[in-house]
Image (cartoon, helix red, strand yellow):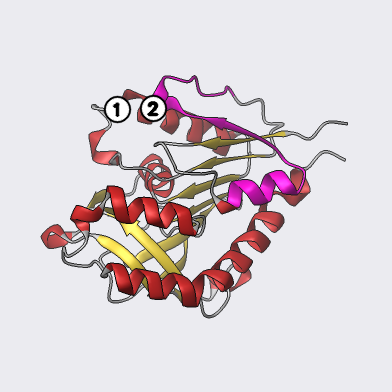
């Protein structure tokens, strides 16, 4: 019996498939990448999908009028939640979910930009999905308030975006941080978004490089285990 489709929604020309996508493919998932920013059509969910992942990108939730496909993604999020399809939002994806749930999504104060590695503080509720200690990579200009009805899972102090993870309805999770980024994708960030480095809230390139070298292996180990647990029960048998 074929595996159920797992849709990954991308928002920019990423240098290579990210680590999470590659892990899911290697573990038998029927990963189907959709790029609405290139004009591709979003799926209509039946409720029988293995899941949906909405990834990050340079677009902003506050620019929905500029990027009509983001409004279409909000409708996809609503479909997934109504049909209890497992849903993961990463960075922009988490912001879109938060927006759908009625949270405020806005720029960080004083022009701050999240860019670099920061320690998470996991809530009591978050310990079911996150380790007590985890250092994560941030890359965002906007953040979200706690969505109404959602459970906060993690915060990050001393960074522009203190809210980092939430759970909604047991099937929807938003991650403001970037566990999927490979070394090649970080190189791409450091090249394409070089002008951001030096703004309030950012770390230098050498600090980012050091953070990746010290923390990425643990971050990836958690992320792969999380993806396995989040989507495993939805693989066809």
Residue 31 is a magenta residue: yes
Q: CA distance from mark 2 to mark 1?
A: 8 Å
| Rendered location of residue 113, percent (x, y) | 23, 59
| In the displayed structure image, the side of residue 18 where residue 57 appears, left or right | left
Q: Is the residue marked by circle 2 packed among few (<14), some (14-19), or many (20+) residues within 10 Å? A: some
Instruction: Name the foreground residue: 178 vs 92.
Output: 178
Q: Residue 1 occupies which quadrant of the picture?
A: top right
Mark 1, residue position: 67
**Residue positioned 75% across, 43% down in the render:** 234
Residue 39 located left or right of residue 25: left
In the rendered view, tell whether residue 117 sits above or below residue 113.
below
The residue positioned 30% from the left and 39% from the top of the image is 59
Contact between marks 2 and 1 (CB within 8 A): the answer is yes
- Number of labelled discs? 2
Residue span colored magenta: 20-44
Q: Position of residue 195 (x, y in %)?
A: 18, 54
User: Which residue is nearer to you in this view: 221 or 207?
Assistant: 207
Examine the rendering and report whether any part of residue 127 can be seen.
yes
Give 218 or 119, whichever is nearer the viewer.
218
- Secondary structure under tag 2 reads helix
Residue 90 rendering spot, x and y as whole percentages: 46, 50
* Quarter of the C terminus within the rendering: top right
Query: Does residue 145 sit above or below 31 in this rendering?
Result: below
Q: Position of residue 193 (x, y in %)?
A: 26, 51
Other-residue count near label 1 (Cα within 10 Å), few / some / many at <14 / 14–19 / ≥20: some
Residue for point 70% across, 56% down: 228
Q: Residue at x 18, y 61 (%)?
A: 112
Can residue 144 be seen from the camera position used here? Answer: no
Circle nearer the N terminus (2, 1): 2
Is residue 211 highlighted in magenta? Answer: no
Tell me the tag on residue 37: 2
């Amino acid at each position: 019996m074929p595996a159920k489709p797992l849709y990954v929604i991308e928002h920019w020309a990423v240098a290579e498939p990210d680590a999470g996508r590659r892990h899911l493919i290697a573990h038998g998932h029927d990963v189907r990448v959709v790029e609405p920013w290139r004009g591709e059509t979003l799926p209509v969910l039946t409720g029988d999908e293995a899941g949906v992942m909405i990834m990050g990108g340079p677009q902003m939730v506050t620019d929905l009028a500029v990027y009509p496909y983001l409004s279409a993604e909000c409708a996809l999020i609503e479909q997934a939640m109504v049909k209890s399809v497992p849903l993961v939002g990463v960075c922009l994806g988490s912001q879109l979910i938060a927006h759908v749930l009625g949270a405020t999504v806005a720029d960080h104060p004083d022009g701050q930009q999240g860019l670099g590695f920061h320690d998470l503080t996991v809530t009591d509720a978050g310990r079911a999905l996150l380790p007590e200690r985890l250092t994560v990579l941030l890359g965002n200009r906007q953040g979200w308030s706690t969505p109404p009805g959602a459970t906060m899972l993690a915060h990050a102090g001393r960074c522009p975006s203190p809210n980092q993870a939430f759970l909604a309805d047991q099937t929807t999770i938003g991650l403001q941080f970037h566990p999927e980024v490979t070394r090649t994708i970080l190189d791409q960030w450091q090249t394409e978004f070089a002008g951001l480095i030096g703004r309030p809230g950012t770390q230098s390139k050498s600090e980012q490089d050091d953070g990746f070298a010290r923390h990425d292996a643990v971050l990836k180990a958690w992320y792969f285990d999380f993806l396995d647990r989040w989507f495993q029960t939805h693989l066809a048998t």
